[in-house]
Image: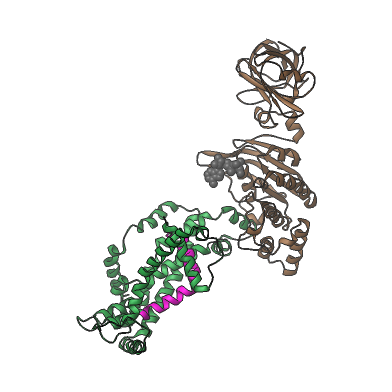
Chain colours: A brown, B green
Amino acid sequence: MGVCVSNLVVQYGTTRAVDNVSFEVRDGEFLVILGPSGCGKTTILRCIAGLVEPTSGEITIDGRVVNGIYPSERNIAMVFQNYALYPHMTVHDNIALNMKMKKIPKPEIEKRVKDVALKLQISELLQKKPRQLSGGQAQRVGLARAMVRDPAAFLMDEPLSNLDAKLRNEMRDEMKRFQKITGRSIVYVTHDQIEAMTLGDRILVLNHGKAIQIDEPRKLFDEPNHLFVAGFLGNPPMNIMPCDVRLTGAGRYDMKFGSNRVKVEIKDSMTPSASTSMGFRPTDVIISDDGPFRASLDYVELLGTEMNAHFRIGEGRFIARLLRDSITEKLFQTKSGTDVSFGVRANRIFIFDSLSGHRYNALLDSADA
Amino acid sequence: MVTPSELFRYAIHKFRHLLRGNGGTEELEINRMSLPRKLLLEAAMIMVAVVYVVPFYWMVLKATRISILANFPPDLNPFSRTSFNNFINNFHQVWSFGNFPTWYFNSILVSSVVVTTSVMVGAMAGYAFARLKFRGRNILFYVVLGTLMIPFPVILIASYVFMVDIGWINSYQGLILPQIASAVNVFLMRQYFLTIPSEIEDAAKIDGLRPWQIFYRISAPLAKPAFAASAIYTFIGSWNNFLWPLLEAQTVNYWTLPLALNFFKGANGTQIYWNQMMMADILALIPTFIIYMIFERYFIQGISLTGTKG
Ligand SMILES: Nc1ncnc2c1ncn2[C@@H]1O[C@H](COP(=O)(O)OP(=O)(O)O)[C@@H](O)[C@H]1O
Ligand SMILES: [Mg+2]
């Protein structure tokens, strides 16, 4: 049941818009596809909808392979970023068109239109034309048009990104409610990580047409298995510091960044010559005189109850997101260029291969400056 | 200075005022102008109006004269009692002289068939070029565009010979068919369809419309302004077409109105009877005028759409 995409490839000339992507959307699951603009999110969605013919790969909806089947026969509904309402039809007719095409009897159509209009609070708008609607209202109509079909899955392509920030927050709650009242699978595309984190049961992170990681939001944030995910999620995202690596024993390595050294045990194999990076989240930095590392302070930004302290280590830079307390407050008085001692919360240092982006399964032994 | 575009919008504003007794609701720059600027604009408008109106006035005036000779002093009032009698007289002469009912019928038949088919063909071809993916689409489109570069007189003789060979001289199909193929309409329609977001058509596919239904239920209704513009331009072109009917219609029965006007020019040997000719002109203008009155809104829309305005 749900939606299953396997080995999907879409090639446009020399660009590979979707590169061998596989994932499954479980029945009733809210799956978010997250990635930067141009990474192939829309193309995946359009393949599921049947608007783009995949170069290769198989798409299954509700247990049925739908490759080559006309969009309306796939038992899906789609919601568009620009709403894509029919400008020359009333809201009522926009919602009713798909039922008219199916030759559903008129009284039944009226009943169902009324029903969804009530659920999405657009009953007053039924006789209006799309151009008379605000952005939020237009997208509600878009949702109603999708919902009235009662499909196996909803496909949503950045449905909130044309709305202003305040409305977007309201509509985000609306989307959650939408999932509850429909109880159907939702594939939701966005480039906004807050939307992805708050809405998704699971998130598929996409980059350059490749599926990078699919996981629950919490797992994705706490245990990114790829450099791209680490650098994409979080605001500010994870600090990535290039390291020099030296093999010291079986599976044991010395990693140096600036004058700082970390001894790690790596469970999977690593070539010592490979370029390696160390990552830690800005929120996991602890400023403390007995911290194992040293970095030179660049400048400090006040955010209110928190602050961003910018540091340099050699060529590298990183940010610490700190709560203001008696210790961190001193950084405001510290001169730029001064060395500061710091540590990173236990088990919150990640080791990545800089080229492939792969995260090593690493265990921290000790750290010192 | 008053710019041409201000002038144009003001002219339309004035014109609507004249036709409907209101100037529309849109806010015009003119309403916010200073007095000297307004006066300047008004003066410019009057001059433009004079340039346009004088020929019409002269046409009506000439149609109310008895002979080609000028009276002295000239009577410049076309609405006097004698003028009216002369007018009726000229009308009878002209009407009985030629076969106006047939010419009206021919002109209306040819123009209406040309307009409907040419616009439909243009819309469908334009839609195909804008939306459908098929082999050779771009090459074909450039070929269509290329025909825009060829002036009609260049292919005139070839077309004529072709018509002779297939025996279509003196026939309605011969009058109509060559006027249907219009690269302008194809191009105009294609450009307009390209401005419609393709997601609307995607939504229609998901809603269960097949490509043909998408065209006539969604895309075509949305392209109404483009339909209006190409219909108007095609109508003007076809109604005023002189060169092609001149070759094609070699008997009086297949003449259209422009040929009839030409006939009055030379009907009486070398002498040109201006009064009769102007009378015929008025008769030929009536249908155009009626059509303009009915579709005035679309004329203005069409002109604005194709960017002829300043
Ligand atoms: N119809 C198309 N023809 C050619 N290239 C396309 C087409 N649609 C998308 N692309 C390319 O495929 C890539 C992915 O596009 P898209 O799926 O729209 O990305 P996203 O939705 O993540 O921003 C982009 O590089 C885009 O330029
Ligand atoms: Mg997109």
- Give the quadrant of residue B148: bottom left
Residue extending furthest left? Answer: B270
Confirm whether residue A144 shows in the render.
Answer: yes
Q: Is residue B206 above or below residue A206?
A: below
> Could you tell me which quadrant the C terminus of chain A lies in?
top right
Q: Nearer the viewer, residue B76 or B236?
A: B76
Q: How many marks overall?
A: 0
- Where residue A206 sits: x, y (%)? 64, 36
Identify the magenta region. B282-310
- Where residue B273 sits: x, y (%)? 25, 82
- Give the quadrant of residue A258: top right
| Left or right: residue A216 compared with residue B139 | right
Q: Nearer the viewer, residue B181 or B209?
A: B181
Q: Nearer the viewer, residue B61 or A225?
A: B61
- Give the quadrant of residue A110: bottom right
Q: Is residue A216 above or below residue B211?
A: above
Q: Is residue B305 magenta?
A: yes
| Left or right: residue B188 compared with residue B256 | right
Report the residue at 64% width, 26% height from top.
Answer: A357
Confirm whether residue B174 shows in the render.
Answer: no
Q: Is residue A304 magenta?
A: no
Task: Identify the main secondary structure in magenta.
Answer: helix
Q: Nearer the viewer, residue A24 or B70?
A: B70
Q: Is residue A7 above or below residue A90?
A: above
